[in-house]
Structures are given as structure tokens and as C-alpha cells.
Amino acid sequence: MLRVEHLTKVFPDGTVALKDVSFEVADGEFLAVIGLSGSGKSTLLRCINRLIDPTEGRVLWNDVDVTAAKGQELRHIRRQIGMIFQQFNLVKRSSVFTNVLSGRLGYASPWLSLVHQFTEEERQMALAALERVGIADKANNRADQLSGGQQQRVGIARALMQEPQLMLADEPVASLDPVLAHSILRYLEQLNREDGITVLCSLHFLDLVHRYATRVIGLKDGQLVFDGLPTELTAKKFKEVYGQEAEIVTVDGSGSGLMDHGE
């Protein structure tokens, strides 16, 4: 169970990114997070795993206060929370295999992690993760030789190396074409349904939200303005989150979904 309680984040320049946001996520949910650019989606996800420290409020993961954790306790919590980024965040000049193995660094002793020493078991785990996302044949390629969709699959495989219970996906398909977007989200759906991994994923297209999410929250100007089922996210509700300038489009341009102009 993930609980976010009265979360507020004010940056040093005075920008209020989150304002008194509270919600719960049950184990095994696929939660879509929607909102305009600057609505607080990325800040929210980064506060959950403490890549960003909130100004006020708490994040509790399995009744452990993430916002109060330090040192070894925080490292232990982060092992359980995988992260997938829009821009992949791979080491471009390193091999795919090395990038995936880096997902295991949270389990290594500090001195071993400095020299990237991994066990044979961890190497087999990395190969299995690459097999699962369908690119084991790319293990020895440099990361920058892969397409965008392939790089995002490396990102998923890297996150799998943590053996996570919770997966945070920060706009993982924003830079991908519609076919690749569905491909990546199907992998996340598989992890959610088959492995029971709870997923929090920021998305922009209404048809993707309806297809993959089991629940949706909407942020507007850092505040929670929607929390409900995908079936409750009507075009009217969607425009309440995105504003009246929201345009009716789909990921293939056919016109049954919604996307904001700012993305």
C-alpha cells in the first residue's frame, strides 16, 4: 500500500509544484497520473522515491515513512521502487547489458558498486530481464545504437533488476510513436498483472488511460482535481483537468481521445 498524505513541494524559486496532495494506491493497481505540463506529475513521482524531497507531507510505503527515511533505510526502500524515465536515462556509451546490471547497484556493497562487480546470478538475472522485454540479442550493443523503443525496454529491464514491488513510470511513452507506446505499456501491464507490481504511470492520451489503467488521478496546478476509475474520466472530466483548450485527438490522430497542446 502506498499512501501520499498532504504532499506539498515548493521549489527555491517559489514555484509551488504540489499543493496538499493526498491519495492511496492499493497493491496491484495500475494508476495513471494525468495533467498538463507543469501540473506536478513528475515532481509527485520523484517525491515518492525521494529523488526530490517534499516541503511538507508524507509518503508511506507499506507503512514505512519514506519522507523520514535516511541512509540504509532509504536505500532499502528504493530497492523496492523501480523508476522508468521519459528520456531513458541510460549510459549511452555503455553496453545494454551493463546498463541493465546497473539496476542491481542498490544491492551491492558500496566498494563493489564502484567497480561494477556483479555475481554470476546477477548476470543471469540481467539476461532474463532482457529476454523478458525481447531484446536479449542486443545485450552487447551500445545503448546509443538502439531505437527509442528499444532503449525504453532497456530501462524497464534495468528497473526489473531491483525486483521492485512498485514501478514509477514518468511519461515513459511521450517520445514514442503510437505502436511503440502500446508495446511499452503492454510490458508494464504484464508486470502489473503477472508479477503483481503496482504501477504509477503518467500518461496523456485518453485512449491509453482507458486501455491500461485501473484507476486515474488528475493534477492541475499542483493540486489533485480527479481521482476515479478510467470509465469515470469522461471528455468533460478530462477537460476539467486539462482546460477547455484540450484538443480531441488520439495517439493515431483519429479523434477519440484527448491531449493537451503543451506536450
Image (cartoon, rainbow, N blue to C red):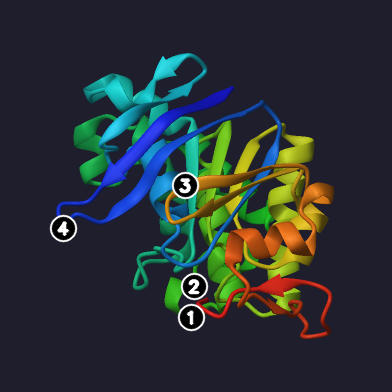
Q: Are marks 1 and 2 in contact (CB under 8 Å)?
A: yes
Q: Quadrant of residue 174?
A: bottom right
Q: Quadrant of residue 29?
A: top right
Q: Are marks 4 and 2 in contact (CB under 8 Å)?
A: no
Label at residue 145: 1
Of badges 4 and 1, the one in the foreground is 4
On the rendered structure, is 4 left or right of 130?
A: left
Q: Which residue is mark 2?
A: 141
User: In whole angstroms, how far apart are the C-alphas of marks 4 and 2?
Assistant: 42 Å
Task: Please state the horizontal and vertical placement of residue 123, each as a whole percent of the image.
Answer: 50, 44
Task: Please state the horizontal and vertical placement of residue 64, each as a whole percent of the image.
Answer: 42, 16
Task: Please state the horizontal and vertical placement of residue 261, each as a whole percent of the image.
Answer: 56, 80
Label 1 amino acid? Answer: Gln
Label at residue 13: 4
Of badges 4 and 2, the one in the foreground is 4
User: In whole angstroms, how far apart are the C-alphas of marks 4 and 1?
Assistant: 38 Å
User: In whole angstroms, how far apart are the C-alphas of marks 3 and 1?
Assistant: 40 Å
User: In whole angstroms, how far apart are the C-alphas of marks 1 and 2?
Assistant: 7 Å
N-terminal of the pair, mark 3 or mark 2, is 2
Q: Which residue is mark 3?
A: 223
Residue 142 visible, this angle? no
Label 3 amino acid? Answer: Gln
N-terminal of the pair, mark 3 or mark 1, is 1
User: In whole angstroms, how far apart are the C-alphas of marks 4 and 3?
Assistant: 19 Å
Of badges 3 and 2, the one in the foreground is 3
* Local secondary structure at mark 2: loop
